[in-house]
Amino acid sequence: MLKRVEAASLNPALEEIGSVERVVDGVAFVVGLPSARVQELLNFEDGSIGLVIEVREYRLGCVLLKIGGGLSAGARVYLTGDIVRTPVGEKLLGRVIDPLGAPLDGLGEPNAVAFSPIEKPAPGIVDRALVTKPLLTGVTVIDAMIPLGRGQRELLIGDRKTGKTTVAIDTIINQKSSDVVCIYAAIGQKTSSIKKVIDAINAHGPVGRCIFVIGEAEAPPGAQWITPFSACAIGEYFRDKGKDVLLVIDDLTKHADVHRQISLLLRQPPGREAYPGDVFYLHSRLLERAAALSEEQGGGSLTALPIAETQEGNLTAYIPTNLISITDGQIYFEPKLFYEGQKPAINVGLSVSRVGGKTQSPGMKRLATDLRLDYAQFLELEIFTRFGAMVDDKTRRTIEHGRRIRASLIQRQYTPRSLAQQLSMLTAVKEGLVEHVPAEQAGKCFDDIFEAMSARKPQLIDTIEKNGDLDDSQQEEFVETLKSIIEFQELNLKKEGA
């Protein structure tokens, strides 16, 4: 103790102490801290933590990231001289944390290797590489018609309760057989909804390679506001180490609402739909951080799947149009398809991936070349048949073929399909091998076909999973095996009927 006393510094230290002027709905106004800077952390005497958002001549506007015992006017406020940082490292894998790194799963502190600023500059053009590696979602309609690549930003957009989060969860579950690190960021979601997502991924997905960053609806607005930035910073840690990362942000519509709430409480000028003018910059600086890095930078990638909600399918609203212009494409979920039982309810005509087939495997690219055109033609013709119009044989065959395509695109939740399973289905459809199967029974038929193919030709299945395609001789063998399997099934069906 004497040594510590002798070694103690007795030099004077300058410390600025301010006070709370007033507190309103998660936003505090502070006076008496002339040295404070934007994005600086503040400590309050009751244990609350705040982030400076606005600096004015006589006072500061800050948003609360953590609420302590009870904050009121007159409470002392202390400068920290630091910015918001989140813990990063492999110890976070499999954990559930809040945006400041506090554990929410009851397993203790994550013991992170470092703390990273939640906001960083996006990689420059020189540091980026072309997006060429596929990110398989396990959802046939996406992998075949709207392919995604590692390092892409693809928006999942649609009305509420149309399956957006389900597709994002399926994509995470499908990474169980890959090396992709998955991060799920929940913004303003109900605790019960978040629990369902975590339980589904823990039951079916890569538990040891998934991180959950949660800013639930009960959290302070500031905590919800920094949630996607914290999740992105965690993903960048793995990306910079040469790994591939998938970031799901659920959802940016609620994030924009929180940003509007904070801005209006701070008396910032409102713009279109009462959103502040910087809401576009807010999301663009976040999503620009998703990229595929060059080999000189480690070759890692960060893929972003932000989710946005529309009202009555209005894609021209302020936030949807902003996000569509920022991202590399959108997947639109249509309520009409959802209520008709076509799940996932993805409207292929309004969905687009600007990376496109550059990331598709050779086998999928070969099959999907005519698939989208045939499906679009079927959808146009189907409209006329609903009026009871007479059709010729060629049109009838086109419609029946389109119904088999639609049946192959219907998929149950939490059951992503492997590449080999998708190629088996689409090959059978393209070759016209399932035209005799009733459309309502096609789903079970596809499962039986793949199960039989895996038993008869496991070496072909392994080749597809490894190389993404088959050579000409293997492709002929593959098609002949499919024909024999389907003929055998048809023979059995006839015997059962007799």
Image: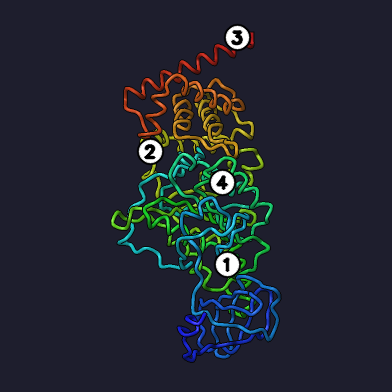
| Residue 388 drawn at (x, y percent) | 64, 31
Q: Is residue 109 above or below residue 94?
A: below
Label 4 near label 2: C-beta < 8 Å? no
- Look at the numbered disc 1 and give the secondary structure of its residue: helix
Q: Is residue 308 visible?
A: no
What's under tag 4, amino acid-wise? Answer: Ile
What label does residue 225 carry, if any? 1
Query: What's under tag 3, amino acid-wise?
Result: Lys
Disc assigned to residue 371: none
For the residues bearing labels 3 and 1, Cβ distance under 8 angstroms: no
Label 3 vs 1, first from the N-terminus: 1
Q: CA distance from mark 2 to mark 1?
A: 38 Å
Q: Residue at x 50, y 37 (%)?
A: 140
Marked residue nearer the N-terminal end (4 or 3): 4
Label at residue 169? 4
Label 3 sits on a secondary structure element that is: helix
Q: Is residue 118 left or right of residue 24?
A: left
Residue underneath mark 2: 361
Q: Could you give the CA–CA distance between mark 3 and mark 1, rounded to whole angstroms? A: 63 Å
**Mark pair 4, 1: CA separation:** 22 Å
**Which amino acid is tagged 2?**
Ser
For label 3, count other residues whose C-alpha is less than 10 Å away and answer few (under 14), some (14-19) or many (20+).
few
